[in-house]
Amino acid sequence: MNGTGQDELIDKALEALRFVDDPEVGLNVVDLGLIYEIEIDPDERQVGCLMTFTTEFCPMGASIQQSVTEALKMTFPGATVQVNITFEPPWSQAMISEAGRMFLGR
């Protein structure tokens, strides 16, 4: 698939993930900077997402991961979705988008 098509698929995934909030912060996982990478293989019908949490001990981590998985499954029906968690690099407030900072009043 050409680069433009891949970019459009990634944009579609990110748009879906903007509806997944970190319930403790009230901001979506994209603007909060929790999504590190999205890989989509339309031929193999696979979607991969590498993400983090604000802390390694995030009490809502499993719930957020499940919500991200479900959002991607709904966006790409029939695809195998794999959401992996990493803490490298560790999350920091610098990863919050400009829109996210405005939402949080920072």
Image (spheres, rainbow, N blue to C red):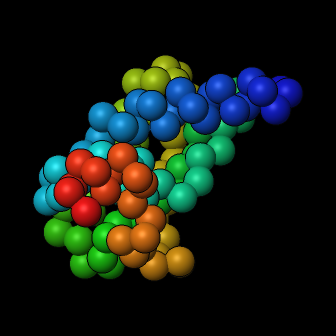
Residue pictured at 66% horizontal, 37% vertical = 40
Relative to residue 17, is residue 103 drawn left or right?
left
- The image quadrant that residue 17 belongs to is top left
- The image quadrant that residue 4 belongs to is top right
Instruction: Tell me the quarter of the image containing the C terminus.
Output: bottom left
- Pick the front one: 94 or 88: 94
Residue 3, percent across and down? 82, 32
Relative to residue 9, is residue 76 drawn left or right?
left
Residue pictured at 29% horizontal, 41% vertical = 20
- Pick the front one: 31 or 23: 31
- Pick the front one: 70 or 2: 2
Residue 26, percent across and down? 17, 50
Which residue is at the far right? 2
**30 is higher (above) or lower (below) than 3:** below
Residue 81, percent across and down? 51, 40
Could you tell me if residue 70 is visible in this image? no
Relative to residue 21, is residue 70 drawn left or right?
right
Residue 39, percent across and down? 65, 44
- Pick the front one: 62 or 25: 25
Which residue is at the far left? 24
Could you tell me if residue 19 is visible in this image? yes
Residue pictured at 53% horizontal, 77% vertical = 89
Instruction: Tell me the quarter of the image containing the N terminus.
Output: top right
| Total residue callouts | 0
